[in-house]
Image: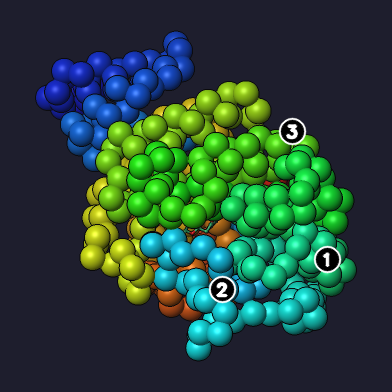
Amino acid sequence: MDRLTLPALNLPERVEHIASALLNPEETYRLTDADALTLMREAPVALLGTLAVARKRQVSGDNVYYNRNIHIEPTNICVFKCRFCSYRRGAGEPDAWYHDLDAIERLAAQRRGEPITEVHIVGGVHPDHDLAYYCEMIRRVKRQLPQVAVKAYTAVELHYMIRKAGLSLTEGLRRLKEAGMEAIPGGGAEIFDPEIRGRICPEKPTADEWLATHEAAHGLGLATNCTILYGHIETYEHRIGHLSRLRELQDRTHGFDAFIPLKYRNMHNPMSAVGEVSLPEDMKMMALSRLYLDNIPHIKAYWPMLGIGATELALSFGADDIDGTIDDTTKIYSMAGAEEQRPRLTTERMEQIVRAAGFTPVERDTFYRPVRR
Ligand code: V47
Ligand code: SF4
């Protein structure tokens, strides 16, 4: 059979031009914002998958990463009222929960002896706590599980607790690092465009504040992730503008390890009427993330949010990480209607998912170092 060439695919001219630049083995082509928009509007989904996997292979070869982790969600009581959030409650509402420091330490103690390498701590922005409380929470988790890396608090929680303490971002983060925080999750970024941000999460720190928090963390050598919340009232232009700001910061700091495109799930929140985007749209977003963010090494398909089938498919659209075993310790997505109501996967099942997509599973730690057992 003749070799398949791009002209044989009969693509729109601009798409063919961008695809051949991306596939050129002589140089790494950086997508412009206009290229990204053309690909999202005009490229066949399957072509985006092919391009994204080719790029993924340059970065992480055959490897697809997973880790053994649990989440601790200290509370769903939150001072903010993001309109997409199915999880937050006001203090005193019937299904609000709150674990005090002793309870959190007990949750960690229950995991002693298990082979987990990471504890991910994220929750609502509680009105009553201060920086010292959050430092103490990390110390207590580390006391019970000294071998794990604590990846804790979104930039939204961090910004709130550090400003409340009257400290600079760098000084506040330095205190948390001293307490044992080693990495920061990517949440709270949502959509950077001020108009859309103002409509879906008006009280949250601004895009500049979110980015400044991560920049300060990178300055202290903390590993951080970044996210987008897509598939609600934003346009492709808003998504690309968001990615552009992340790519620009990463060019300066090289501090982001992974990007996680978070699909808006619409159950039980004030934005439910917006609906959810389709599976092909999720895959386009995954591929765009891989292709546009050429300076962020890992693109994560977060299975509790996408579901297991879509996570396997995402590996054919440029993802190289499927996150962790979780062990039924997060409620953010199940409360928003995700299929996985008791999110938990064994490492065997994670490895099966990766092999079924044609890749090699690699257990990693928080810093993407392979874990050898
Ligand atoms: O910031 C809340 C999102 C985020 C909904 O860094 C929703 O490894 C969709 O940051 N539909 C928090 N998304 C979760 C998060 C995260 C998750 C997994 C891995 C990592 C990492 C970070 O959850 C929030 C918000 O963007 N979220 N409600 C919803 N209805
Ligand atoms: Fe609070 Fe986070 Fe929910 Fe916003 S997304 S209301 S900050 S818990």
The residue carrying mark 2 is: 76
Query: Can residue 39 be seen by looking at this rendering?
Result: yes
Q: Quadrant of the C terminus?
A: bottom right
| Label 2 beta carbon within 8 A of ligand 2 | yes
Query: Can residue 346 be seen by looking at this rendering?
Result: no
Label 1, residues with CA under 10 Å away: few <14, some 14-19, many ≥20: some
Q: Quadrant of residue 4?
A: top left
For the point 65% across and 41% down, the residue is 213
Q: Classify mark 2: helix, strand or loop.
A: loop
The residue carrying mark 3 is: 219
Kind of residue at badge 1: Glu
Cα distance, mark 2 to mark 1?
19 Å
Cα distance, mark 1 to mark 3?
23 Å
Q: Is residue 289 left or right of residue 88?
A: left
- List the single residue furthest toward the top: 26
For the point 36% across and 42% down, the residue is 195
Q: Classify mark 3: helix, strand or loop.
A: helix
Which of the two discs, 3 and 2, labels the residue nearer the N terminus?
2
Q: Classify mark 1: helix, strand or loop.
A: helix
Q: Is residue 247 left or right of residue 144?
A: left
For the point 43% across and 74% down, the residue is 335
- List the single residue furthest toward the bottom: 94
Which of the two discs, 2 and 1, labels the residue nearer the N terminus?
2
Picture coordinates of residue 107, whole percent (x, y): 73, 79
Query: Please, is residue 171 above or below residue 107 in the view?
Result: above
Kind of residue at badge 3: Gly
The residue carrying mark 1 is: 136
Kind of residue at badge 2: Asn
